[in-house]
Image (spheres, helix red, strand yellow):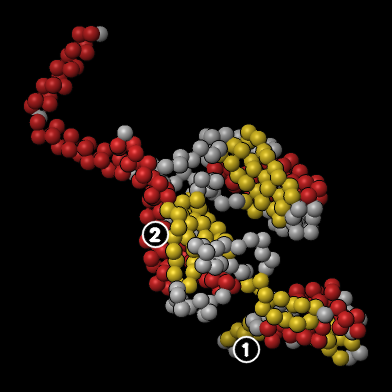
Amino acid sequence: MHLYSDRMLNRIIRFSVKNKLAIALFTLVWIVYGSWQLTQLPIDAVPDITNNQVQVITTAPSLGAEDVERLITFPIELAVSNVPGVKESRSLSRFGLSLISIVFDNDVDVYWARQQVTERLSQVEINENANTPSLAPVTTGLGEIYQYVLRTKKGYESKYSLADLRSIQDWLVKRQLLGTPGVADVSTFGGMLKQYEVAVNPARLKAMNITIADVFTALKKNNQNTGGAYIEKGPAVLFIRSVGLTKTIADINKIVVKINNGTPVLISHVAEVRPGSAVRYGALTMAGEGEVCGGIVMMIKGGNSSQVIETVKARIIDIQKSLPEGIVIEPFLDRTKMVNNAIGTVEKN
């Protein structure tokens, strides 16, 4: 065996000596390939050690913690308990919220796991007071790689409200960032979520013999489009369609709630319709200069944070060009700095 090894080694040396050019080219290609692979290493200052898990989120604004556990959390946990590869499941039931974390083996593909959980969820009968269960994005608690705020420049403070900033964030910035490779989700913070508020007058309701349920029903039924059949007219076909979506406050005011003695009672007769915002549970401020609206970019699990951040930065430059005058995107957390500092520390040591 030892003699055979010596012969093989002599043949390799003899071949290398006779074919110097081929060996040099092969070595050069190997060095270039190794250098390129070195740049692709997913170096991160905060290595993600999160286990392989799928989170199921269900909201139920009208249910208490006990009802959420009994009617939502327990049925879902029972349905996913027989999925192959499940190690354990943890749940959190609060007022109006059910959060279930299903942990899989490390060798299970996360997208296959999400598909299995989705199939089981379709078999669960969820309480009618709860919304449809949804899966959390394919990210982890350490996936927050880039954070920014949306604010106004000096001189434009009175032109844009917090509701305007939130709308720009949700409909312009967030929607464009979600198409960036490596980005799993963008979470919005701060600002005011714009809504149309129908402030009902109880005295008018009582005087016109109308209940609050009648108002809810009228608003729901009169804010939708409907489709019908079609009419053939010669070589053409005319499709029947009814457009009923409300677009302005005036449209909401004209909705008929009930007919009293042949007289229609409109929303404007029993309530005041005005611009409003969703209930706020906090605010986002920056540098003591007042409130702003911001977002957190979440990276897909297993992604290369340095590459994703560079892509996000290039995308932010393009998004900035499409924003209204006086609005600026200002980053305040960039994991690239942490990665570079960590690499610098290693090199120095």
Badge 1 local density, few (<14 within 10 Å), some, or many (20+)?
few
Label 2 close to label 1 by CB (< 8 Å):
no
Q: Is residue 241 above or below residue 18?
A: below
Question: Label 1, on which residue?
Answer: 233
Snapshot quadrant of residue 330: bottom left
Answer whether residue 122 is visible to the viewer in this image. no
Q: Is residue 27 left or right of residue 288?
A: left
Residue at the (62%, 88%) spot, across then down: 233
Q: Is residue 3 left or right of residue 346?
A: left
**Which picture quadrant has residue 25?**
top left
* CA–CA distance in space, label 2 to label 1: 55 Å
- Image location of residue 219, percent across then percent down: 76, 77
Nearest the camera: 28 or 22? 28
Helix, strand or loop under label 2: helix
Q: Quadrant of the C terminus?
A: top left
Q: Tell me the residue that label 2 is attached to.
A: 313
User: Which residue is at a point 50% across and 51% down the rendered structure image?
Assistant: 144
Q: Residue 47, image x and y in percent?
A: 46, 40
Is 332 in front, or is 62? 332
* Residue ranking furthest to the front: 288
- Residue type at mark 2? Lys
Residue 125 vs residue 321, the one in the foreground: 321
Side of 223 where 174 appears, left or right: left
Residue 114 appears in the rendering = yes
Dot placed on the residue nearer the N-terminal end, 2 or 1: 1
Q: Quadrant of the N terminus?
A: top left
Place of residue 343 in the rendered image (x, y in percent of width and height, measured from the top left):
34, 41
For the residue carrying disc 2, how many other residues have a C-alpha within 10 Å: few (<14), some (14-19), or many (20+)?
some
State the residue lying farthest toward the top. Answer: 2
- Write the residue at 45% across / 58% down: 332
Q: Amino acid at mark 1?
A: Lys
